[in-house]
Each structure stands twice: as structure tokens, then as C-alpha cells.
Amino acid sequence: MNNMLYTIGHSNYSIDSFIDIISQYKNDRTYIVDVRSVPFSSHTPQFNADYLKNILRAVGMHYVPMGKEFGARREELEAYNNSKQVDFIKTAHLGLFQAGIQRIKKGLSLSCNLILMCSERSPLECHRFALVARNLYKQGIQVNHIIGNHEVITQAQAEELLINKYQSKIDFLFAPSYADLLDQAYSLLNKDIGYRKN
């Protein structure tokens, strides 16, 4: 059983550069799990779902769309707070999201090599870190974020960077534990990057 997965943000990589990077983490059962709500872009058409699926197949990898389960733009009304912003805590308890978690765990149990893909290059600017990876990590799954060519940071390292990012807004003095500091930092990130309905 595999207990580790990767994430990556495609950003504005050329398709050749993107394939070169993910190929460093490829094995014979590699699946690129697309967690974008909308897997299309006029700015980066090389990452439109149909095109990407064919390119990945040509290099021996599989494309799996999971935007409904893990996307940042939620259809469920229960995912939104009073400010019409997606609340990552609420989202993590939704049935569709939990079904996605179970699907990922099943893939890992079958020794699949999974790479979660979204748009933003930095995990600290993306829901793949703050929502999806956070909840997988809580369940004991090792998460590694690919941040460049031959550059990877763990979920724990990314969480330390998250606390540093918001250190001026976090109550260090009265927070009873590291977990509380982390919860504060995740909440602040949610406010900064969570999808808002118009």
C-alpha cells in the first residue's frame, strides 16, 4: 500500500516543462488528479482537460478529473458562509468531498501513484493545500508539494511557512498549542483565497 502523494500547480509552465517535472515522480501507475473546479483556461490552454488527458496518455500517465469532489468553487450551498465565501471547514464535511477522500485512499491502497494538480504554483495560494491536502494529511497520508524542478516540500513544512506568512495576525501569546496556531493560520488563508460568489 502506498501512503504518499504529491501535489503540483501547473501555473504557466509549458506542457513540456510540466511533463518533465512530474515525470521525476512517475511510476508505472501514475494518475494526475485534477482538483480544479473548471479544468479549462484561455491563458493556459495546454492545461485544458481534453488536451492534457491526451498528452498524459501519450507519456504513460492517466488523467482523473475530481473537480466536483475537490474543487474550490462549490455547488453545495452548505459550503458557503454568511459572506458567500467557501468555508474550507464546512466543505471538508460534505458528502461529495468525503467521497473524494475515500477514492484517493482507495487509489493509494492499490499502490497508485497520485499527483493532485491545480492552477497556482505555490501551495500557499491554493485550496489543494488548504483544503484537500490538509484533510488527507489529517488522515495520516504523507503529502509532498512539488514547487519547482527537483523542489519538494512536505505538508508539515508548508504549514510552518503558513504560520510564518500570518505571524503578524496570529495570537502566539495565548494560543494553547501549535495546532491552535495552525488553525488560526488556515482560517486566515481561507479568507484570503476562498472562492466568493458574486
Image: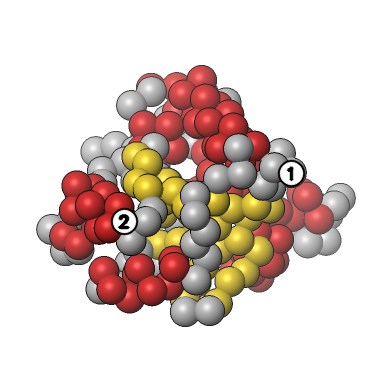
The residue to which callout 2 is attached is: 56
In the picture, the quarter occupied by the N terminus is: top right
Left or right: residue 141 versus residue 174 is: left
Q: At 78% from the left edge and 61% from the top edge, which residue is drawn?
A: 172
Foreground of the two, 105 or 131: 105
Q: At 24% from the left edge and 38% from the top edge, which residue is drawn?
A: 198
**Residue 129 visible in rendering:** no
C-alpha gap between disc 1 and disc 2: 28 Å
Q: Give the residue type that dot 2 points to.
A: Leu
**Residue 21 visible in rendering:** yes
Q: Closer to the N terminus: mark 1 or mark 2?
A: 2
Left or right: residue 129 versus residue 58 is: right
The residue to which callout 1 is attached is: 140
Foreground of the two, 68 or 14: 14
Q: Could you tell me residue 12's position as x and y percent?
A: 27, 71
Left or right: residue 106 versus residue 149 is: right
Q: Nearer the viewer, mark 1 or mark 2?
A: 2
Instruction: Please tell me how crowded label 2 is: few (under 14), some (14-19), or many (20+) other residues with Cα within 10 Å.
Output: some
